[in-house]
Amino acid sequence: MKKILIIEDDQSIAELERDYLEINDFECDIAARGTTGLEKALAENYDLIIIDVMLPGINGFSICREVRL
Protein backbone atom coordinates (compact mmCIF):
# COMPACT_ATOMS: atom_id res chain seq x y z
CA MET A 1 0.00 0.00 0.00
CA LYS A 2 1.34 3.43 -0.94
CA LYS A 3 1.83 5.90 1.91
CA ILE A 4 1.08 9.61 1.47
CA LEU A 5 1.71 12.59 3.75
CA ILE A 6 -0.66 15.56 3.45
CA ILE A 7 0.72 18.79 4.90
CA GLU A 8 -2.25 21.16 4.94
CA ASP A 9 -3.37 23.69 7.55
CA ASP A 10 -7.01 23.77 6.38
CA GLN A 11 -8.54 20.76 8.11
CA SER A 12 -11.49 20.39 5.72
CA ILE A 13 -9.20 20.33 2.66
CA ALA A 14 -6.83 17.85 4.31
CA GLU A 15 -9.69 15.54 5.27
CA LEU A 16 -11.21 15.74 1.78
CA GLU A 17 -7.86 14.83 0.19
CA ARG A 18 -7.39 12.00 2.67
CA ASP A 19 -10.90 10.62 2.05
CA TYR A 20 -10.40 10.50 -1.73
CA LEU A 21 -6.99 8.88 -1.39
CA GLU A 22 -8.09 6.29 1.18
CA ILE A 23 -11.03 5.28 -1.03
CA ASN A 24 -8.39 4.41 -3.63
CA ASP A 25 -6.34 2.28 -1.20
CA PHE A 26 -3.70 4.80 -0.14
CA GLU A 27 -2.60 5.13 3.46
CA CYS A 28 -2.55 8.81 4.52
CA ASP A 29 -1.11 10.86 7.36
CA ILE A 30 -2.01 14.52 7.91
CA ALA A 31 0.11 17.29 9.42
CA ALA A 32 -1.49 20.69 10.07
CA ARG A 33 1.71 22.70 10.61
CA GLY A 34 4.74 23.02 8.39
CA THR A 35 7.18 22.13 11.17
CA THR A 36 5.21 19.00 12.11
CA GLY A 37 4.96 18.00 8.46
CA LEU A 38 8.69 18.40 7.95
CA GLU A 39 9.42 16.26 11.02
CA LYS A 40 7.09 13.51 9.74
CA ALA A 41 8.52 13.72 6.21
CA LEU A 42 12.07 13.27 7.47
CA ALA A 43 11.22 10.58 10.05
CA GLU A 44 9.13 8.26 7.88
CA ASN A 45 9.24 6.91 4.34
CA TYR A 46 6.44 8.35 2.16
CA ASP A 47 5.74 7.58 -1.48
CA LEU A 48 4.22 11.04 -2.01
CA ILE A 49 3.96 14.26 -0.03
CA ILE A 50 1.21 16.77 -0.81
CA ILE A 51 2.23 20.17 0.55
CA ASP A 52 0.32 23.42 0.89
CA VAL A 53 2.52 26.43 0.10
CA MET A 54 1.34 28.76 2.86
CA LEU A 55 1.65 26.97 6.20
CA PRO A 56 2.17 28.05 9.80
CA GLY A 57 5.69 27.48 11.06
CA ILE A 58 7.49 26.90 7.76
CA ASN A 59 6.27 27.31 4.16
CA GLY A 60 5.85 24.54 1.62
CA PHE A 61 8.84 25.59 -0.49
CA SER A 62 11.17 25.32 2.52
CA ILE A 63 9.78 21.87 3.30
CA CYS A 64 10.52 20.76 -0.27
CA ARG A 65 14.08 22.04 -0.01
CA GLU A 66 14.69 20.22 3.28
CA VAL A 67 13.18 16.94 2.13
CA ARG A 68 15.17 16.92 -1.12
CA LEU A 69 18.51 17.20 0.73
Image (cartoon, rainbow, N blue to C red):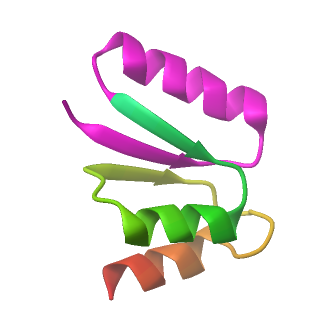
Question: What residue is shown at x 77% (from left), y 40% (from top)?
Answer: 10
- Residue 48 coordinates in the image, percent (x, y): 32, 50
Q: Residue furthest left?
A: 1
Percent position of residue 62, x then y: 57, 81
Q: Residue at x 52, y 17 (%)?
A: 19
Specify whether residue 11 is painted magenta: yes
In this rendering, position of residue 41 left or right of residue 13:
left
> In the image shown, does 8 or 42 lie closer to the viewer?
42
- Residue, far front: 43
Toward the top, the furthest residue is 23
| Residue 57, position as x, y percentages in the image | 78, 73
Q: Residue at x 30, y 15 (%)?
A: 24
> In the drawing, does residue 33 fall left or right of residue 28?
right
Q: Is residue 35 above or below residue 52?
A: below
* Residue 23 figure quarter: top left
Foreground residue among 43 and 20: 43
Q: Position of residue 44 (x, y in %)?
A: 35, 60
Q: Is residue 69 magenta?
A: no
For residue 8, above or below residue 16: below
| Location of the N terminus (image quadrant) | top left
Residue 28 quadrant: top left
Q: How many marks?
A: 0
Residue 62 lies, with reference to residue 43, above or below; the image says below
The stretch of residues the image draws in magenta is: 1-26
Q: Which of the image's four quarters has the C terminus?
A: bottom left
Residue, x 74% and y 63% (percent of image)?
A: 54
Please, which residue is most extreme toward the bottom here?
A: 69
